Image: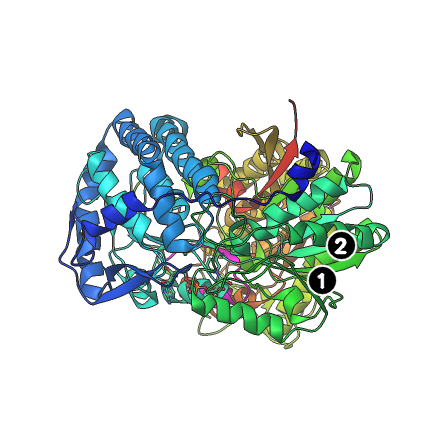
């Protein structure tokens, strides 16, 4: 026998990692685990079992957190927060650095415990999860050091509630805890009920690091415990990773509460293979995309789109590779695919696959008995079939073919999700042409499932909102410093006892798709000045008008492809045209509000100049990630932004909303100041003469309270902002859960529209989504 033959026929011997140390650690809590609150473990309460999914053996018993335990944890976090926030930046950085060092020191124990509890192969927990956890704490030690200087005028949110899933228990802990602490917040973390153990070990590690008591609190339990944390009035932010359905319920539960929220939810991420791709590498990438962690990955490349000409060859290569995957004991270092996290999840995968049509291929690899599912490929499904649309969260890949790049993009985007996408091609032009067209928060080119603390991660559409990692991730744990005053309702001036009757109709119409449009309902409202003069009428828009305006805004989305230079020019032009009519606008403001409008007009012109300047300067970033490549953080427009404009500054408020939105390439639907709408209906005449393409800005006048709901519930709107003095924040946040659009609402807080912080980066960030594009680069 030649050495080559021996190599080819030799099978792997088992190479088990010992679980002795992990078992010994578990044995130190014989009575079960309590919660970690205020630096100590509480007495165990209402214990439930955490099992090893590979064997079914009970690993430990942990406490089901009650509302009272959540309350105690939030109280401890609240007490600890002011002091933690006041620490010198380098002191906080030192704690995070200590956590990073200790994670490295205990890496082997943590990795084994993670594999025991979750069922993931030790190769993954040891070589991927743990190094990323340590890297996250190191990186955020750096952010803690730099944040106060680099983000002046910002302060921590307070107490952050973190709710995490079972697929990357410790890594998700790191993703939530590191930025929260770096920014000066304290944390109450609820791990997933299937996988609480590494979080409890981390609690001990945090004690070893000397983390002040109350800064990190951990309450174990199921969805009820999570819900109690979400509902707790003492929590300032919820950071959630998990299913889209729970994400939606958390959006509704926190609506109107003023709690900040970031949601990292599910996906059905496309994995696109063009016919010129290095097929062998693409197959290897696919192993990583869908069989990494048994496909229990939110950004798993679970939807293969392969170009028709190479589909058969690719599927053949893929099947051969699938047959070589080794499934079994997660602690065996030669294992590729471990156990499914829990029999419940196994039953879900089995049910979904069994109900599916299509040609199914199951890996011809020995299968252990128990909670395991074989690598599976399903070919020949239609784009609309449930498995093409729904997350399976298991080692199951569905595959479709496409003919042209345009079709690939169309199929890739044909999903309610938008988390990640992978593109394989040897043609750099093609890759870079496709990447911006994909509706996803992360795009990997000729690689997949790459993560780093410096690079933002997160989705669009029903994959949630917010980014984790990088400066963009840190900002989700900060807010502008100071306590804004309560916003007082601004009411329309009442009709005088005897209104002047005019023969001439001066009803300003709506502005939709570049044209003036009569309101669908056929009703209008009179606008009076402070001395009772009738200044004009405006249309009362309704749901149908909103639909028309959204359709126009959607049709105008090509605006995103206009160059930033072009958008800047148009903003300058709008400013110029407004300044040519400055006297008229000032007089109109004075007539409506009774106070001189001159300063407001001047400020509006200056603001337009500001965003003309920003249009080609709100740059993305190139992130230094520790791989052979770079991660480009591209600031992309959100899409269609709907906004209820400020009541109190009829012109400046409107401009403050329009200008950042269109500068960044969004189209918008605006409801202007309700009591003083005439400046907006005059302003669209300025827009009409400024070369702004039709449909980029649409204006529907009418009552904020009535229009908030159709705007926030509309499926084709990507973000809703409200600066209204009407109380609509709760309606908007509740209704936005339909498609998980981003919201930015004032919660009744006042804003000085003349102030410098009413323009600039905070607005531009709200007008953009960071798309992280990973590109091979350098050696
Ligand atoms: P899940 O979304 O129910 O659980 C995630 C976390 O949320 C857990 O800590 C859970 O206890 C908590 N939770 C559940 N209900 C809650 C509520 N009403 N309020 C607050 N917290 C609550 O996910 P589950 O049931 O474990 O998995 C179901 C499906 O979700 C999976 O099959 C998969 O499709 C998807 N999923 C997606 C993840 C992702 O990373 N995007 C992670 C885990 C699951």
At x 38%, y 48%, the residue is: 114
In the image, residue 356 above or below residue 141? below
Query: Picture quarter containing residue 552?
Result: bottom right
Q: Tell me the SS state at disc 2.
A: helix
Estimate how packed mark 1 is, as few (under 14), some (14 to 19) or many (20 or more) residues with alpha carbons within 10 Å.
some
Q: Which residue is mark 1?
A: 516
| Magenta range | 733-747
> Farthest top residue?
779
Q: Nearer the viewer, residue 273 or 119?
A: 119
Residue 579 position, x and y percent, is 63, 38
Ligand 1 located in image quadrant: bottom left
Q: CA distance from mark 2 to mark 1?
A: 55 Å
Residue 220 position, x and y percent, is 27, 58
Q: Nearer the viewer, residue 242 or 195?
A: 195
Q: Which mark is residue 315?
A: 2
How many numbered marks are there? 2
Question: Is residue 600 shown left or right of residue 279?
Answer: left
At x 61%, y 28%, the residue is: 628
Estimate how packed mark 2 is, as few (under 14), some (14 to 19) or many (20 or more) residues with alpha carbons within 10 Å.
some
Q: Is mark 1 within 8 Å of ligand 1?
A: no
The quadrant of the picture occupied by the C terminus is top right
The quadrant of the picture occupied by the N terminus is top right
Is residue 720 part of the magenta span, yes or no? Answer: no
Residue 665 position, x and y percent, is 66, 45
Q: Foreground mark, 2 or 1?
A: 2
> Upstream in the sequence, badge 2 or badge 1?
2
Question: Is residue 258 shown left or right of residue 443?
Answer: left
Query: Picture quarter containing residue 202?
Result: top left
């Amino acid at each position: 026998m030649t050495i080559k033959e021996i190599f080819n026929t030799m099978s792997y011997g088992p190479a088990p990692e010992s679980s002795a140390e992990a078992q010994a650690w578990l044995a130190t809590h014989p009575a079960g685990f309590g919660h970690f609150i205020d630096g100590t473990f509480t007495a165990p309460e209402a214990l439930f079992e955490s099992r090893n999914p590979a064997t079914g053996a009970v690993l430990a018993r942990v406490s089901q957190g009650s509302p009272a335990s959540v309350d105690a944890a939030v109280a401890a976090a609240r007490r600890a927060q002011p002091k933690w926030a006041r620490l010198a930046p380098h002191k906080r950085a030192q704690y995070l650095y200590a956590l990073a060092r200790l994670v490295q020191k205990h890496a082997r124990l943590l990795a084994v415990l993670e594999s025991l509890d979750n069922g993931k192969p030790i190769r993954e927990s040891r070589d991927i999860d743990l190094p990323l956890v340590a890297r996250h704490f190191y990186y955020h030690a750096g952010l803690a050091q730099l944040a106060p200087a680099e983000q002046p005028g910002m302060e921590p949110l307070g107490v952050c509630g973190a709710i995490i899933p079972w697929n990357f228990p410790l890594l998700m802990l790191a993703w939530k805890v590191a930025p929260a602490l770096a920014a000066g917040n304290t944390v109450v973390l609820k791990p997933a009920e299937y996988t609480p153990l590494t979080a409890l070990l981390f609690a001990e590690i945090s004690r070893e690091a000397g983390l002040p008591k109350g800064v990190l609190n951990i309450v174990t339990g199921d969805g009820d415990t999570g819900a109690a944390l979400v509902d707790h009035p003492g929590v300032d932010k919820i950071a959630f990773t998990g299913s889209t359905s729970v994400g939606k319920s958390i959006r509704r539960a926190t609506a109107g509460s003023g709690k900040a929220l970031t949601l990292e939810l599910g996906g059905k991420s496309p994995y696109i293979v063009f016919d010129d791709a290095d097929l062998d590498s693409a197959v290897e990438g696919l192993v990583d995309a869908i069989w990494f962690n048994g496909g229990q990955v939110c950004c798993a490349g679970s939807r293969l789109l392969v170009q028709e000409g190479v589909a058969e060859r690719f599927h053949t290569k893929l099947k051969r590779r699938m047959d070589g995957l080794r499934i079994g004991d997660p602690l065996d270092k030669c294992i590729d695919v471990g156990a499914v996290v829990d029999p419940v999840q196994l039953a879900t995968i089995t049910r979904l696959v069994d109900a599916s049509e299509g040609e199914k291929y199951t890996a011809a690899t020995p299968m252990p008995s128990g909670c395991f599912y074989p690598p599976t490929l399903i070919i020949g499904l239609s784009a609309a079939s449930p498995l093409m649309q729904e997350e399976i969260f298991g080692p199951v890949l569905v595959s479709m073919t496409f003919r042209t790049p345009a079709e690939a993009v169309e199929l890739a985007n044909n999903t309610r999700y938008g988390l990640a996408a992978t593109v394989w091609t040897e043609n750099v032009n093609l890759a870079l042409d496709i990447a911006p067209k994909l509706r996803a928060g992360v795009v990997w080119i000729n690689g997949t499932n790459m993560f780093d603390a410096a690079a933002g991660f997160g989705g669009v559409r029903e994959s949630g909102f917010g980014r984790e990692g990088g400066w963009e991730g840190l900002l989700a744990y900060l807010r502008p410093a100071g306590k804004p005053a309560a916003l007082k309702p601004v009411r329309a001036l009442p009709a005088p006892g005897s209104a002047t009757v005019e023969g001439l109709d001066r009803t300003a119409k709506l502005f939709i798709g570049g044209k003036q449009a009569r309101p669908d309902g056929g009703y209008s409202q009179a606008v009076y000045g402070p001395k009772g003069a009738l200044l004009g009428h405006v249309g009362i828009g309704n749901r149908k008008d909103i639909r028309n305006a959204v359709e126009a805004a959607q049709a105008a989305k090509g605006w995103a492809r206009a160059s930033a230079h072009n958008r800047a020019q148009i903003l300058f032009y709008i400013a110029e045209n407004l300044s040519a009519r400055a006297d008229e606008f000032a007089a109109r403001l004075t007539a409506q509000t009774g106070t001189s409008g001159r300063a407001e007009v001047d400020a509006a012109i200056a603001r337009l100049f500001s965003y003309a300047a920003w249009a080609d300067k709100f740059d993305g970033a190139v992130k230094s990630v520790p791989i052979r490549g770079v991660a480009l953080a591209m600031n992309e427009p959100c899409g269609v932004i709907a906004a209820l404009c400020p009541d109190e500054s009829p012109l400046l408020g409107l401009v403050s909303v329009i200008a950042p939105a269109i500068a960044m390439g969004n189209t918008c639907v605006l409801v202007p100041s309700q009591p003083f709408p005439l400046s907006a209906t005059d302003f669209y005449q300025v827009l009409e003469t400024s070369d702004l393409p039709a449909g980029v800005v649409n204006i529907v006048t009418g009552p904020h309270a009535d229009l908030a709901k159709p705007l926030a519930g509309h499926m084709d709107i990507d973000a809703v902002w409200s600066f209204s003095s009407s109380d609509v924040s709760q309606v908007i946040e509740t209704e936005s859960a339909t498609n998980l659009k981003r919201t930015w609402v004032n919660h009744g807080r006042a804003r000085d529209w003349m102030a410098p912080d009413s323009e600039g980066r905070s607005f531009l960030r709200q007008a953009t989504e960071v798309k992280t594009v990973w590109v091979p680069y350098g050696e």
